[in-house]
Amino acid sequence: MQNHPIRHDWHSNEVADLYNTPLTTLLHQAQSMHRQYHNPDVIEKAVLLNIKTGACPENCGYCSQSAHYNTGLEKEKLMPLNEVLAAAQKAKDAGAQRFCMGAAWRSPPAAAMPALIEMIQGVNALGLETCMTLGMLKKEQADSLADAGLAYYNHNIDTSPEYYDQVVTTRTFNERIDTLNQARSAGLKLCTGGILGMGESRADRISMLLVLSHLAPHPESVPINRLVPIEGTPLADATRIDDEEWIRTIAVARILMPKTTLRLAAGRHELDWAAQRLCFMAGANSVFYGEKLLTTPNVPAAQDERKIFKLQPH
Ligand code: SAM
Ligand code: DTB
Ligand code: SF4
């Protein structure tokens, strides 16, 4: 596998064939691709902070923060700047490269924009890469965030276009794509991926990866989450996909999008260390780091240091 070009024209049959490749061969192909574009011994640390919690008007069937479900989560207003910067400093001290601020909004309210801009400027000044995930963006909002110095915008497509309305009905898949286009046009780097294990089929997983790989340029970051089941949401009892399917999805994503930073994202706390290491062999080169995701627990940082980052002596 020498010098494979970056492609945006993958066909579903090719992706299905990759999924059906014997695991060791698939991992080898993915790792070979990975080594053409990345230092294979480096794993990015991205730290998350929920800057506005709960009471979201959207009905995403997986989410603890939707106002449509009773999940027992305490809602909170937009976090003050000093608390955001204290969390960012802590992330920096722990060795994070990226700091991702998330808000439970359908889209950011105009009144919040000045505070968001201060957060971007403050976190940039600490020497961290900034990422925000705030819901849908209009052109002017994307432009203001980019002008303030935001580096990445996270907006997950979550699943396939075909399965989307089984997961959320308060917005459409195409609205998701519109926001990604606004963010891209404003000059923001894209972080967009999905969630496995929401009851979708493998054909849906293939379709989701096709949409991501047909974006030109490819998203700079692709997080692959496995559903963190939240009691009180419609997807609380969704059938879990097994570890191998997650590993295979990461390998296939790496082959389709060789240059992207590929994140082994939420749900990692339920994966044992052997399976996590296979994910890194499959081309994952980023994790969410630190005790908490947005509203749920993550892998304890001390364990990550012992089990993962000790193997990365950089
Ligand atoms: N409200 C904004 C939005 O939806 O884009 C930003 C915050 S939202 C919580 C960010 C992303 O987190 C979602 O798009 C989804 O992919 C992921 N997410 C939320 N709850 C999750 C869960 N229980 N398990 C896995 N991923 C989840
Ligand atoms: C992403 O793909 N996963 C993150 C981040 N991008 C915003 C969020 C995961 C949330 C997991 C459930 C929770 O903590 O609420
Ligand atoms: Fe709201 Fe985002 Fe949760 Fe959907 S995923 S309910 S938009 S916070």
Image (spheres, rainbow, N blue to C red):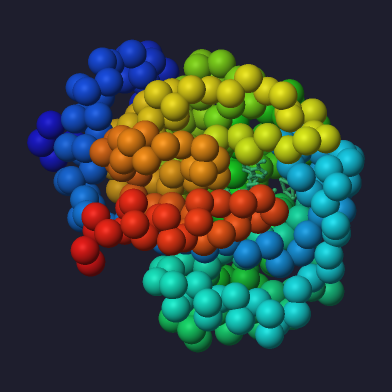
Say which residue appears at 68% left-offset and 23% top-offset.
Answer: 238
Considering depth in this image, is 57 or 50 the residue closer to the camera? 50
- Quadrant placement of the N terminus: top left
In the rendered view, does 96 fall on the left or right side of 176? left
Say which residue appears at 79% left-offset and 28% top-offset.
Answer: 234
Which residue, as the protein is rendered here, is positioned at the far left? 2
230 in relation to 74, above or below: above
Task: Locate residue 122, reporting x and y percent.
Answer: 58, 84
Say which residue appears at 79% left-offset and 70% top-offset.
Answer: 78
150 in relation to 253, above or below: below
Residue 11 at least partly seen: no
202 in relation to 232, above or below: above
Task: Locate residue 3, reporting x and y percent.
Answer: 13, 40
In the rendered view, does 72 fall on the left or right side of 247? right
Say which residue appears at 21% left-offset and 50% top-offset.
Answer: 40
96 in relation to 286, above or below: below
- Asked where in the image residue 139 lies, by quadrant, the reply is bottom right
Considering depth in this image, is 289 or 30 the residue closer to the camera? 289
Task: Locate residue 283, reporting x and y percent.
Answer: 30, 41
